[in-house]
Image: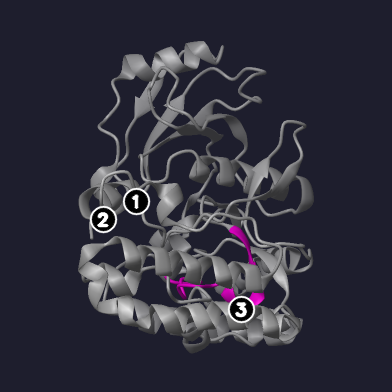
Amino acid sequence: MSSPAAHLPAPLPEHAIQTLLQALRLPQATSISNPQMTAQYHSVYFLTLPSSELSHGYSELVLRVAGNHLPEIKTVNEIGVMTWLSKNTTIPLPEVIAYDSSTKNPIAHEYTLLSRVQGVTLGDIYSSLGDKQMNRMFDQLIDFLTQLQARPWDGIGGLKVDDQGEVQLGPVVDETFWQVPDIKALWPEGETVATMNIGGPYKTYVEYMVAHVTKYIRLIQTHEKLVFMRGIIPRLEVFVAALPKHANELNNVKLRLAHKDLHFANMIFDPSSGKISGILDWEFAGVVPYPQWNPRSSFLWNGIDTSESLQESTGCWKSSKSVARRRDARYLRKQSIAEGSETGSGTGMEGHGAREHL
């Protein structure tokens, strides 16, 4: 399996970015930089330009240029989620200046153009923060999570903005999806993101589970290297048929909007105020069954791939749960790293088990 970062767009020439700004009727940039950062799904450019009404008064913007991993749906989902959050919560976000979920634009890539959040990546400086500062930060995060948990939803999926500007449930978008580079490399011609992954939205947890397992059956039937798994198809079909019979019990689960990848590298911290000034990267957020709010146990991970990361993350979990206990934030207090890894992504069957055989 390839890394998403290996399939990011080639560096854009400055004139292409300036042409995009012109098409958006924004002033020309006086400075364009392409900082080196850990980014899996976007190339990032920092732009400085004269502030204007169309830039919402901002003079520093961030251009995020998407790779072709999950065409259209990822950008649509992120804009839908950020639009809903900006209207219904106080979670600090970049402001959306412009976006395009197609490639029919001067840079020939999907993009989002956002205001630049002031501060530094929390993952870069959290180890220098004292206990008082960390507890204050945990308090903020609990406030954010409380707002997300307070809003019930009537289905499972991502979010999208409709033609009237209203936010509606949309298809599921997940980082574990089969993505274009691996589909092209490993699957027969004609397979697409839509044929390889579930869609949605789904009204209930049972519908969501049925969609997953039905998709796995199809994939097992499709790929010649999964012949060895075909013997379990009758059992999977029996499982699918049995799920609706237990719908009353299985569907008795809260559905909540979750970021799903809320680690320190996705948080911007303002040292001058001592507060989180922005939560980034909402492209894989969505409404999920409550136990799946932290599917990959990334909450409070420092965003750095080292052997010490798990130990440090465990320490942060303990501290945050202490703050949550004081705040009586039950949804966080009940969680643990072990619970997060056990519940996984709900079905735990996004195709990873089969991928090693392809």
Q: CA distance from mark 1 to mark 3?
A: 26 Å
> Which quadrant holds residue 319?
bottom right
Which residue is at a point 55% across and 77% down the rendered structure image?
240
Tell me the residue that label 2 is attached to.
Answer: 3
Give 60 or 291, whichever is nearer the viewer.
291
Determine whether the residue tagged by mark 3 lies in a helix, strand or loop: helix
How crowded pointer 2 is (Cα within 10 Å; few <14, some 14-19, many 20+) is rated as few
Q: Secondary structure at mark 2?
A: loop
Viewer-side label of 1, 3: 3
Q: CA distance from mark 2 to mark 1?
A: 8 Å
| Residue 168 painted magenta | no
The spot of residue 104 in percent (x, y) is: 45, 21
- Please, is residue 251 above or below residue 180 in the view? below
Is residue 293 visible in this depiction of the protein? no
Q: Along the polypeptide, which appears first: circle 1 or circle 3?
A: 1
For residue 291, the mark is 3
Q: CA distance from mark 2 to mark 3?
A: 27 Å
Q: Left or right? Give the position of 56 relative to 27.
A: right
Q: Residues within 10 Å of mark 1 (few under 14, many from 20)?
A: some
Q: Is residue 190 above or below residue 175?
A: above
Residue with the mark numbered 1? 40
Q: Nearer the viewer, mark 2 or mark 1?
A: 2
> Start and end of the magenta stretch?
286-301
- The answer to if 299 sits in the magenta stretch is yes
Q: Report the side of 266 relative to 143 (left or right).
A: left
Q: Which residue is at a point 24% across and 78% down the rendered structure image?
A: 228
